Image (cartoon, helix red, strand yellow):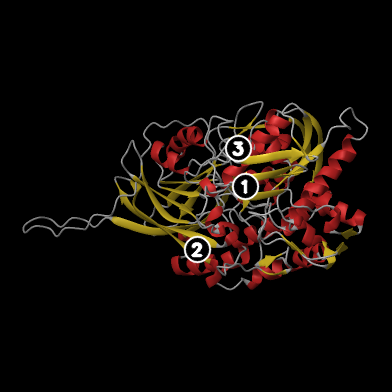
Amino acid sequence: MPLNRRDFVARSAATAAGAALAGGASVAAAQPAAAGEMPKKHPVTESFAVLGTTDLHGNALNWDYFTDAEYDDSAHNDVGLAKISTLVNGIRKEMGRGRTLLIDAGDTIQGTQLSYYYARIEPIDQGGKHAPVHPMALAMNHIGYDAAALGNHEFNYGIPLLRAFEKQCDFPLLGANALDATTERPAFPPYAIRRIRTDRGRDIKVGILGLTNPGIAIWDKGNVQGKLTFAGIVEQAKVWVPRLRAAGADVVIVSAHTGADQPSSYGDQIPWPENAGVAVAEQVPGIDAMLIGHAHVEIAQRIVVNKETGRNVVLSEPLKWGERLTRFDFDAEFSHGCWQVTGVRSTVINSNTAAEDPAVVSLLAAEHKKVVAYVNQVIGTCTEPLSIAEAPFKDVPIIDLIGRVQADTVKAALASTQYAALPVLAQAAPFNRTAAIPAGEVKLRDAAGLYIFENTLEARKLTGAQILDYLEYSMKYFTQVPVGAPVDTATLTNADNTPDYNFDSVYGVSYDVDISKPVGQRIVNLSYGGAPIDPAAEFVLAVNNYRANGGGNFPHVASAPVLWTNSDEIRNTMIAWVKDKGAIDPADFASVDWRLVREGVPVF
């Protein structure tokens, strides 16, 4: 049976006095007794496993709702909790149910049309007794999770929906640094303590500390401001790890929605790093292992030495969406009246090695069928096929479509205001490199696939000079390639680890991007309406709320005057636009307004 929220322990008044520290030291080999000496007792040892997922993002089944087909990618990864369930069942059979724990490091309820449907179409926080149960709660309860940390995307749909999801889970959602804005106390359980059953008369107490990303205060400002604050990950770990030890934890695992040490996506707008996994392991004594997430990278095992104790801390991050399962294997020795960790190892298991658990597939069959019908609604037509594949290095019509929809929406919203005469530009990025709109019938999933995030739309006022700065910052996305050197599209983009979603083009202006020049000197011939942009001219920039709140740390936009905001997702705005037009015709909106050049010569 899955453990329930009442099993967790969250004691805020305990102190660190007498807390025993555990490390990753190897077990010493037993030495034979010398002649005439009494033989030494063999130490009492136990082994157990802690399994972990992260960044599931609404993937319950191995299904892509944007293509309406079984999920597949170029590496033939599989996704979903149904696959994870099979892997977990196998390890529990091997180790024994009482010798395994299962945890998650956050970003659970956003990312697929399955999770979107139960947040916006049939929301789980509406309907009282008749409200549906979230498919992710159904699956995770069935599999038997012991605890999950909160991710930043848990807050995308607002706190009421998150609280509804929390109530539906048979395991605690942990967030020691998610604080009530009034009391400054944790608004969610900081930690849980679980027991590993042994045959030695004393169970091993495993403390699981949950931490989430302080960037939530920026990215979901509209949902959390005045309600929750988010303290630093390292700072709160220093508070709570000693309390876990004082509460009796023999082993401490941190489940944190933070990357290892990747560059921040929002810069220095808040005093704490976004990706602090390594910093926690180095600076906070008493941690044995860390399950991390958020960065969407695979770390099978990374050993970090704690600077105070010299002990090893094992970090692991399984790949997103249920593509991998982390397995921590622990060895513990009973000595001096308590359990001490003597060894930790971690590996990741590829979920494409397992079949889907038919019990999970059956459990979610009704929800899956309902969402498949929803995404296959026909919303219009398109005169020709559109693809986003080349959008990272070319101005393609499908990105112009996003810009046009946003610009049209903002123009209509400002039509009766004092800003009606200002020219409207629009920001867009290639969120999903597989997105495409076919010729002929356009289904809801085709339009939704262009905008995979739950962003909403805002209008900010910027000057021509600020637009130039904005574009210069965006173009750090490209690798510098000297004139005459070969251009390889495989290495041209994502320079300095800039993700696709932080590569903005601006619809409504024209410009060249000289990739032979250093960052900050790349925008050439910036113009509006056929004339060079006046640095003092005022423009309206239609921009998503992530960017408007500072996501990506783009210059000027976060502090720019707010002219208008909307609470509906841009995805829905696009769907409504297509329904209203009836047909998508690139001739109405598409043109090549930016291009990559070297000394004026087009790259493509």
Gap in angstroms between the C-alphas marked 3 and 2: 36 Å
Percent of width and height locating residue 154 = 66, 46
For image coordinates 83% across by 49% down, the residue present is 573
Tell me which numbered mark, 3 or 2, is placed earlier along the sequence: 2
| Res 127 label | none
Residue 125 visible in the current orientation? no
Q: Are marks 3 and 1 in contact (CB under 8 Å)?
A: no
| Res 600 label | 1
Tell me which numbered mark, 2 or 1, is placed earlier along the sequence: 2
Percent of width and height locating residue 581 = 91, 55
**Would you name the residue on which mark 2 appears?**
97
Query: Along the line of sight, which residue is nearer the eye, 577 or 358?
Result: 577
Q: Please identify, in this view, whether the residue under mark 3 or under mark 1 is nearer the observer.
A: 1
**Element type at marker 1?**
loop
**Would you name the residue on which mark 3 appears?**
215
Quarter residue 411 falls in: top right
**Element type at marker 3?**
loop
Specify the quadrant that holds the C terminus: bottom right
Quarter residue 161 falls in: top right
The residue type indicated by label 1 comes to Gly
Specify the quadrant that holds the N terminus: bottom right
Q: Please identify, in this view, whether the residue under mark 2 or under mark 1 is nearer the observer.
A: 1
For image coordinates 46% across by 65% down, the residue present is 96
